[in-house]
Amino acid sequence: MNIAAFLSVLLAYLVGAIPFGLLLSRGSGVDIRRQGSRNIGATNVTRLLGKKLGILTLLLDVLKGFLPIWLAGLFIAPGPQHNLVVGLCGAAAVIGHMFPVYLGFRGGKGVATGLGVFLYLEPLAVLYSLLVFVTTVVLSGFVSLGSLLASLTFPLWLFLLGAPAWTIRLAGFVVLMIWIKHHENIRRLLSGTEKSWKKGKGEEV
């Protein structure tokens, strides 16, 4: 990997690591890392600070997944390493959100940033998984379950849409990391103690 490729991946990580939810909440006097689900993503921001800031956090978290991989696609020269570097930039953006250097490597769960990555790579698959997410949340009331099922089905949509193998491998990695970061939610879902969004207590995605 040449220096340009390395810097692209590093930049993708640093952009992905920007804690927009925390930055947007600064003026409110609420530390989102200490209240609610104590997470920096859009669901916790919405619950603590309202829909406006929650939606803005969601859009910015999606953007920080989309932008680095879009720029890599534009500026990394075509060749045998092109797809590798683009894929690594996508993975780095998601890892940045999950383990941000700015916050001692304690970040979010990567769903929105992963959505941004694949919004660039395969938007139709994103749409299918969003339908899974919305349906699951409406029926169950659990944002975490919607995130888990939507991510789990994503590689399937890629396969059915004929996406390149490297894209499916990238999705597999992102899905694995999302499930690892949701381990506490999974434990609560299995024990019946997960909080329901229908009761105004949704969990962080």
Image: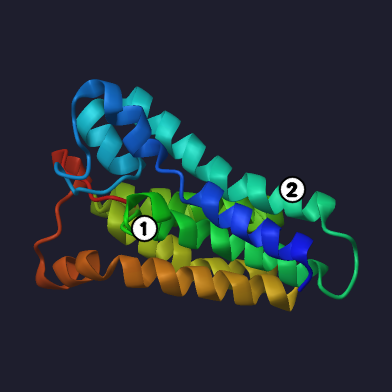
Decide which of 120, 34 is in the foreground and name it: 34
The mark that comes first in sequence, 2 or 1, is 2
Where is residue 69 drawn, in percent x and y? 68, 53
Numbered-mark total: 2
Judged left or right of residue 42, residue 187 is left
Q: Are marks 2 and 1 in contact (CB under 8 Å)?
A: no
Give me the residue at 15% from left, 66% from top.
188
Seen in the picture, residue 8 relative to 81 is either above or below; the reply is above
Which residue bears the numbered disc 1?
Answer: 109
Q: Write down the residue under mark 2.
A: 71
Frontmost of labels 2 and 1 is 2
Q: Which labelled disc corresponds to residue 183?
A: none
Q: Residue at x 29, y 57 (%)?
A: 144
Q: Residue 200: in sight, yes or no?
A: yes
* Residue 105 place in picture, x, y as percent: 35, 60
Given the image, on which type of amino acid does mark 1 rest? Lys
Q: Position of residue 26 (x, y in %)?
A: 28, 28
